[in-house]
Amino acid sequence: MLLEIRNASRFFGQKAAVDRVSFGIERPGFIGIIGRSGAGKSTLLRMINRLTETSEGEIRFEGQNVLTLRGAAMRAWQSRCAMIFQQFNLVPRLDVAANVLHGTLNRRSTLATMFNLWPEADVLKALAILDRLGVAEQAVKRAEALSGGQQQRVAIARALMQEPKVILADEPIASLDPMNAQIVMDTLRRIHDEDGITVIANLHTLDTARRYCDRVIGMRDGRVVFDGLPSELSRGVARDIYGADASFSEEATSTSLEHLGTERDAAFAAKMLA
Ligand SMILES: Nc1ncnc2c1ncn2[C@@H]1O[C@H](COP(=O)(O)OP(=O)(O)O)[C@@H](O)[C@H]1O
Ligand SMILES: [Mg+2]
């Protein structure tokens, strides 16, 4: 088992933001977590990465309980499961290459970092990764000068610099226009396909989950209410995940749902007629 989450909960006061979540990932995969705002998606990713403490339960990676790791061992785990955020979280005034080199920070001295002294091998590696993601020509620009889509690719480059086993992406395309959203999702998918890195991405639209993921986990009120193949995301399942009330009509989701509904209904009708 690569990653195993067993009965994991996180309480904020009385409220369980993540409520007895269990699932296992047996081999490298591209997994989408969907659910409406407040469902517990971000909290779950942060628990895996140890940015948020888990109140109860277990999270194991390759058999090791990551929740008991301390100090250097915890930081090593954190760099093996690199995070990507909706708002990119780059250092805006720093150039792109330096932002990517920050991915090696956990193994560098403070002094070398202060003076921006990077080993040549790391610099070459950073440039190679930027080149692979199609943003090498931006290397000497300040991060803030780049478009959102370019910034997110730089954030992915920074993550790759850590040579992670897992990439945890928290709504990686929620701030991007459709074209850049596609570029970023294609990039994540390619990294999974070519490097065998497991990607767990919180996604706010169904159509993205269906298009890119091998497996989709649906959360509602902190709990897993669906865990299966994208093709199993019927309209009824979507309703379970998103609820049938007002927030169900969230623009992006309902657009994709309409599409989903039509497609499903057609498949259903075909089956009934057969
Ligand atoms: N630091 C926090 N303090 C208190 N409540 C929090 C905190 N972080 C998240 N929550 C609550 O936990 C629930 C799940 O939040 P979150 O994981 O951000 O959901 P999602 O990412 O699916 O939108 C929400 O009700 C949210 O208000
Ligand atoms: Mg969130």
Image (tube, rainbow, N blue to C red):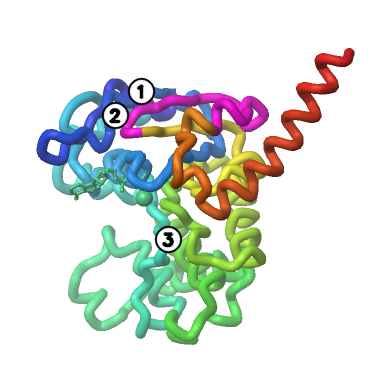
Q: Quadrant of residue 19?
A: top left
**137 drawn magenta:** no
Coordinates of residue 153 in the picture (x, y in percent): 53, 66
Q: Which residue: 81% across, 22% down?
A: 269
The mark lying in front, picked from 3 and 2, is 3
Q: Which residues are magenta?
A: 221-238
Q: Quadrant of the N terminus?
A: top left
| Element assignment for label 2 | strand
Residue reaching furthest left?
Answer: 13
Residue 165 seen in the current view: no
| Element assignment for label 3 | loop
The mark lying in front, picked from 2 and 1, is 1
**Badge 1 density bin: few <14, some 14–19, many ≥20, Cα 10 Å:** some
Question: Ligand 2 within 8 A of label 3's CB?
Answer: yes
Q: Which residue: 52% across, 48% down?
A: 249
Coordinates of residue 178 in the picture (x, y in percent): 63, 63
In the picture, the disc for residue 86 is: 3
Three-letter residue code for mark 1: Ser
**Badge 3 density bin: few <14, some 14–19, many ≥20, Cα 10 Å:** some
Q: Is residue 49 above or below residue 186?
A: above
Residue reaching furthest front?
Answer: 246
30, 39: nearer the viewer = 39
Residue holding disc 1: 22
> Which callout, 3 or 2, points at the residue further toward the start of the chain?
2
Q: In the displayed structure, does residue 220 sit left or right of residue 269?
A: left
Residue holding disc 2: 59
Coordinates of residue 96 in the picture (x, y in percent): 45, 78
Q: Which residue: 24% across, 44% down?
A: 50
